[in-house]
Amino acid sequence: MPTRTTGETSGSSGVALDIDRRDLAWYVDKAVAGLVFVAGISAIIFIIGIFVFITREGIGFLTSAFDFKEFFGSPAWRPTSERKATYGALALIAGTASVTGLAMIVSVPFSLGAAIFIGEFATGKTREALKILVELLAAIPSVVWGFIGLSIMNPLIIETFDVPIGLNILNSGIILGLMAAPIMTTIAEDALKAVPDSYREAAEALGATRWQVTRRVVIPAAKNGLVAAVLLGVGRGFGETMAVLMASGHSVNMPTSVFDSVRALTATIAAELGETAMGSDHYRALFTLGILLFVVTFVINLTADLVVRGIRKR
Amino acid sequence: MFETTALNTRSRRIEGLVRILFLMMAVMLILPVLIILGMLIARGGPVLSWAFLTTPPTNGMTAGGILFPLVGTVWLVTVALIASVPVGVAAAIYLSEYAPDNWLTRVINLAIINLAGVPSIVHALFGVGAFVLFFRFGTSILAASLTLAVMTLPVVIVATRESLRSVPRAFREACWNMGATRWQTIRKVVLPNAISGILTGVILEVSRTAGETAPIMFTGAAFFLPFLPQGVLDQTMAMSMHLFVISTAVPGVPEELPYGVALVLISMVLVMNALSVGFRMYLRGKKKW
């Protein structure tokens, strides 16, 4: 029996059961419930849509010119070669990995350190101010970061290290580290905050100092959240496009030192898609790189979510 | 009874050192950004003028101002908001007011996290495949804005969901007990109490949308156009794209010009963000429950 009240109705009182209460408000209510449900699942629709549409454009490459051994084993990315186009993504994968790796080396200690300071040591105004600054740090657009790499870091690196080119792994790694730091700091701080205060109070009651409490009690309890924070930072660095395109030097290269220029997966798509003919092997190969990026970030995000869920269960 | 032992002094000294170490780490994170901001202001500041904002780029983008990219960014952000705010708010209403705690809700939340984590260039590929080609919008403001809308949807959903959840359950119960339907309750009680939180999220989305480059490169942002867009099916210039173009692809650009563009872009974004933060703090102070 449809009634206008939703939620806690008090069973079958038997009063006025024969009155049809399906007035306009009832129909509007049902219509809205349907509409918000559709909007609610929109995120799922879009995720599936992204996968379907990039696969639709890239599938032609996977079924024809794609060679597993060449794609993952050869550093020769020569899609425009006149004689024989080769699609070896190894150098691009190495480029992405080296830049992301350096970014993590630079920013993980600082991000986690900053999170611990904000979460465990700072109080009141200092804490608020630091949180806001970190948030503003996250707001700087990636193209501005790329420009900073190009025009400020580039001459700085050339001068400091006496190298011919300042657009390299070092440059983009530092830029990317600064870009990934806010997300890691924020999520790590959330993880620390999720540790119940009673844990801290118990340890402090035993005479432990703040650092002893943090090291022996809070960090072990928040371990999963901290791991998730680092994972999401890796995902952020891995998927960054404009800053890496502008600051990494963008030359196909198997890196041997931090002063080598490299080219990242994301940057390759951004630089080449505009010049390819729609439906060509090259065009489809770029969408295939997109599928690779999508799958890897999906796995990273999923893992981070499972790791976090691990703490909630306990 | 409370005599300080040697062990005690030692751990207190370590405490002090550790505290300073972590403070240094936090400062090291923020300091480079402040230095960079300072440099942008120092080098880009002299370029800024009213004429810079109100004249289009001239001489193959090596002179003139930024009127066309600026107007283009406003177009892109506006259309993206029109598309994403209703969907995002409705999705948040579902998640906060209707969704039961089941597997579907968990999948939705996972999808939101993933949507936020997909690389921006993959969103660009999606925009090309879906909006430019499949729906035949061509490279246009519409295609670019829809791509941006999908990308920034998680920002609206998460901000709105949090502000809806902060409305006490008792408010809803009081309204239900008056015989109101679920939707009447949401419209008359929940939304008015959460509207400022939603606005904070929308401002944050504006700032995200305005700064994005990769998603619009192939879906609607042009290298250079000598005129303003007339409608949503036209291409347009955009601030972020303009900065990319003049700092990498145009020869003979005077050194300080890109600094000026970067400064305007970063100011737009930071002002929006500061507004959102300030708004949130003001609300927290005002909240009665």
Image (cartoon, rainbow, N blue to C red):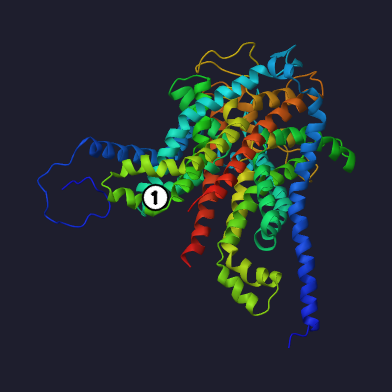
Instruction: Find residue B61 and report its image quarter.
Output: top right
Q: Is residue A251 visible?
A: no
Q: Quadrant of the N terminus of chain B?
A: bottom right
Mark 1 crowd level (few <14, some 14–19, many ≥20, 10 Å Cα): some
Task: Kindly identify which chain the residue marked by label 1 belongs to.
Answer: B
Q: Is residue B159 left or right of residue A244?
A: left
Q: Is residue A185 left or right of residue A9?
A: right
- A70 or B147: nearer the viewer: B147
Instruction: Find residue A225 and report its image quarter.
Output: bottom right
**Total marks placed:** 1
Which residue shows up at 69% across the image and 51% down it? A130
Q: Is residue B94 left or right of residue B120?
A: left
Residue B109, horizontal then vertical, whole percent: 45, 48
Residue A311, horizontal then vertical, whole percent: 51, 64
Residue B96, horizontal then vertical, whole percent: 40, 48
Disc 1 residue type (three-letter): Thr
Instruction: Find residue B23 and report its image quarter.
Output: bottom right
Residue beneath label 1, please?
A: B105
- B101 or A264: nearer the viewer: B101
Question: Furthest-bottom residue in view?
Answer: B1
Q: Is residue A261 visible?
A: yes
In the image, residue A10 sits, relative to residue B150, either above or below, namely below
